[in-house]
Amino acid sequence: MICRPFLTWLLWALILCVFPTQASAQVAGSLVIAGNGPEHTTIEALARAFEKANARAYIDILWEEDSNPVQLVKTGRAQIAMTGTEDPTLAVSQIGWDGIGVVVHLSNYTKEVTKQQVADIFSGKLKEWSELGGPDTKIVMIDRPHNQNIREAFESQLGITGKIPTTAKTIGEDDAVIKAVVGTLPPLSAVTYVSLSTGLSVVANGVAVRLLPIDKIEPEIPTVRDGRYSLRRPLLLLSKKEANPLVEAFTKFALSPPGQAIVGELYVAMPSK
C-alpha cells in the first residue's frame, strides 16, 4: 500500500512539472548594462534587486566616464545602454525623468532665467550676468564631457548642439564641477548644469550654490514630473531590437512598482498607469 504522504508529494511533483513555479520560471544568464552619467547609483540598485529576485541572473555594470554606452550595445559589449537620447537603430524604454539643474554660486543674485537665456549663455551670446539682472561679473561656462548623456540632452533641449564654445572648461565629475562653481569668485561668476538630483542634494547639504528657476518655474521633483519645468531629460534603456528575454525581464522590473520605487529615490518615477 502506498502511504498518503507519498501520494501527496507525488501529486505536488506532478503539478510543479506541469505548472512551473515563479522561481523555476525566472530568467537566467548574464547581462551587461553600460553608462557614463549620474545614474550609476540607481542602475546599481536596480541590478542588485533584479538579481535578488532572479537567482540565476547576473548583471555586470560597465560604467566609465569616457565610454560610449550606445556604441557598446551596438558592438555587443553591452546589452543595455543607460542614456538620455534615443537611437533610431535601437529599442528604447523610458524608466523615469531627470531634471537638468542650472547651477550658480549662492552669491549670484540673478533671480531667474528663461530657457532661451540659458541657451544664449551656453552658446556664448551672453557674456555678463548684469545682462540678466544679476551681478556685474563675467559669465564663466563650465561644460560637461561630449559623451555624457546629460550633455547630449542639455544641448538638444536648448537647440544648441555643437554651439557650446570650445573655450568652455569641461569637467566630468559632479563633485568637481560643483567645487569649480563654488571656487569661482568675482569678477568672475561660474555657471554649469547637473542632474537635478545632484543639484537638490548639494543645496540641501548647504553647499554655496543655488539652482536657477527657468521660465519662472522652480526646479523641483513635482515640476519635472508634470513637465512645467521643461529642462528635463528622459532616463532611457536602449537595447538591440532583437528579442532578449533577460533584457526584457530587466526592463519590465525597472518599470514595476519595486523598480520604480528605486528610480524614485533619486529621480522622477514614471506616472502610475
Image (cartoon, rainbow, N blue to C red):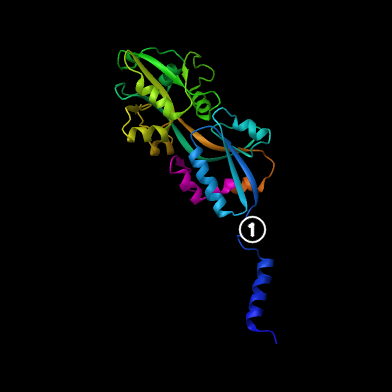
Compared across the picture, whether 47 is left or right of 183 comes to right
> Which residue occupies the foreground of this view, 93 or 15?
15
The answer to whether residue 125 is left or right of residue 135 is right
Q: Residue at x 43, y 12 (%)?
A: 125
Closer to the camera in the image, 223 or 152: 152
The structure residue drawn at horizontal position 69% and vertical position 84%, both measured from the top left corner, is 2
Please name the amino acid that badge 1 sits on: Ala
Quadrant hosting residue 108: top left
* Circle 1: element type: loop
Image location of residue 101, percent across then percent down = 41, 29
Q: State whether residue 72 appears in this view.
A: yes
Position of residue 40 measured from the top left corner of the image (x, y, whole percent): 51, 38
Residue segment shown in magenta = 250-273
Taking the magenta stretch, the answer to whether it contains residue 19 is no
Q: Residues within 10 Å of mark 1 (few under 14, many from 20)?
A: few
From this view, report whether residue 48 is shown above or below residue 163. below
| x then y, percent, for residue 148 | 53, 28
Instruction: Please state the total of marks drawn on the protein image.
Output: 1
Image point (51%, 21%), residue name? 159
Residue that numbered label 1 is attached to: 25
- Nearer to us in this view, 212 or 137: 137
At 60% across and 60% down in the image, what residue appears? 23
Asked whether residue 260 is drawn in magenta, I would say yes
Q: Quadrant of the N terminus?
A: bottom right
Q: Is residue 143 placed above or below 55 in the rendered structure?
A: above
Residue lying furthest bottom in this view? 1
Residue 170 position, x and y percent, is 48, 20
Whether residue 87 is visible here, answered yes or no, is no
